[in-house]
Image (cartoon, rainbow, N blue to C red):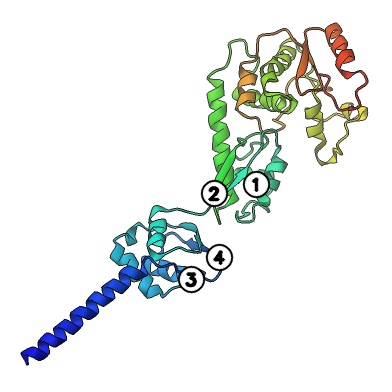
Amino acid sequence: MRRFLLAVFLLLSGAALGAGGWALWWVYQPLRLATPTVDLSIEPGTLPRGVAQAVADAGVDVRPDFLYLWFRVSGQDRLIKAGSYELETGITPHRLMAKLARGEESLRAVTLVEGWNFRQVRAALAKEDVLKPDTKALTDEALMKLLGREGQHPEGRFFPDTYTYAKGSSDVAVLKRALRGMDKRLAAAWTQKSPDAVVKTPDEALVLASIIEKETGKPEDRPLIGSVFSNRLRIGMPLQTDPTVIYGMGASFDGNLRKKDLQTDTPWNTYMRPGLPPTPIAMPGKASLLAAVNPAPSKALYFVARGDGTSQFSANLDEHNRAVNKYQRGRADPSAKTQ
């Protein structure tokens, strides 16, 4: 009898050791995926057993009960984080557990470019096929209300930058980050306002910065372009800047700005209306914000494109006309700036 019990004990012990060895081997073996890349989405509040089932349902050839047991044995089952994950060929149960515990989500990125208007921002977000288009059907007014800015015009209120997001995230989340980004950069720029700056409020600075952004060919010219427009505002001279007219034309602008367009009144036509337009016309970057609140000291009132991206600045009309004659004569490009 004793020999029989010993034999049973040895048999069970061997089986246990064998099972332990198999389990140790299994957690380091690549899992089979239905496709080279599998998208896994874990909703907030999903329990470890549900996560194991979600992995199998996503297209991973694994028994959910085995995976759940591994989650428990690893001691990290309570560390699993909700989110969107991308599982690639070669992933093992061990690597999967680490990925979920660390929250290594699958991230995408969208870039909002300096100088874009809000139509372009919305179009860029709509093209992101893994970004949930929760604002697609909303008007600009409804969108701003959703973002907590009811009654505020959206133009220029979002900071141009590259924003990462997890697959399946809402476009609302990206817009909120860009909105907070502009709030932060505008506030920081305002603290650096020169005592001689012509803008009286952060909102005025944002409007002026958007014009500087659209008028700048070379980054180093921003402070002087800011000076030109600040000087004009200071003496009551119209800004007479083409980008504001183009913005006021909206979708009707066909790429050519004509004399009749300059003579067609809109709230943004700075040839016909004095002072700043009622809203920004684009998203300004940090450098343009600083140029609006702290322009270069100068008496310049005019500038003209030299043809290499830089501008020639002039303090009076005679100088400006000579510069136009020098840099614009014989040029084939009718769109060259002569502000």
Tag 1 residue: 142
Q: CA distance from mark 1 to mark 4?
A: 41 Å
**Rendered view: 71 above or below 136:** below
Q: CA distance from mark 1 to mark 3?
A: 46 Å
Residue 243 lies left or right of residue 202; in this view the side is: right
Tag 3 residue: 32
Residue type at the position of mark 1 = Ala
Residue type at the position of mark 3 = Arg
Please, what secondary structure does the residue beneath circle 1 have? helix
Given residues 285 and 13, the one toward you in this image is 13
Tag 2 residue: 165
Mark 1 closeness class: few <14, some 14–19, many ≥20 residues within 10 Å: some
Residue type at the position of mark 2 = Tyr
Q: CA distance from mark 3 to mark 4?
A: 9 Å
Upstream in the sequence, badge 3 or badge 2? 3
Measuring from the top left, give residue 69's x and y in whole percent. 32, 70
Who's the residue at 58% across and 13% down the image? 194
Closest to the camera, between mark 1 and mark 4, is 4
Closest to the camera, between mark 2 and mark 4, is 4
Q: CA distance from mark 2 to mark 1?
A: 23 Å
Residue type at the position of mark 4 = Pro
Report whether residue 49 is seen.
Answer: yes
Image marks 1 and 4: residues in contact by CB distance under 8 Å: no
Please, what secondary structure does the residue beneath circle 2 have? strand
Q: Quadrant of residue 200?
A: top right
Tag 4 residue: 36
Please, what secondary structure does the residue beneath circle 3 have? strand
Image marks 1 and 3: residues in contact by CB distance under 8 Å: no
Upstream in the sequence, badge 2 or badge 4? 4
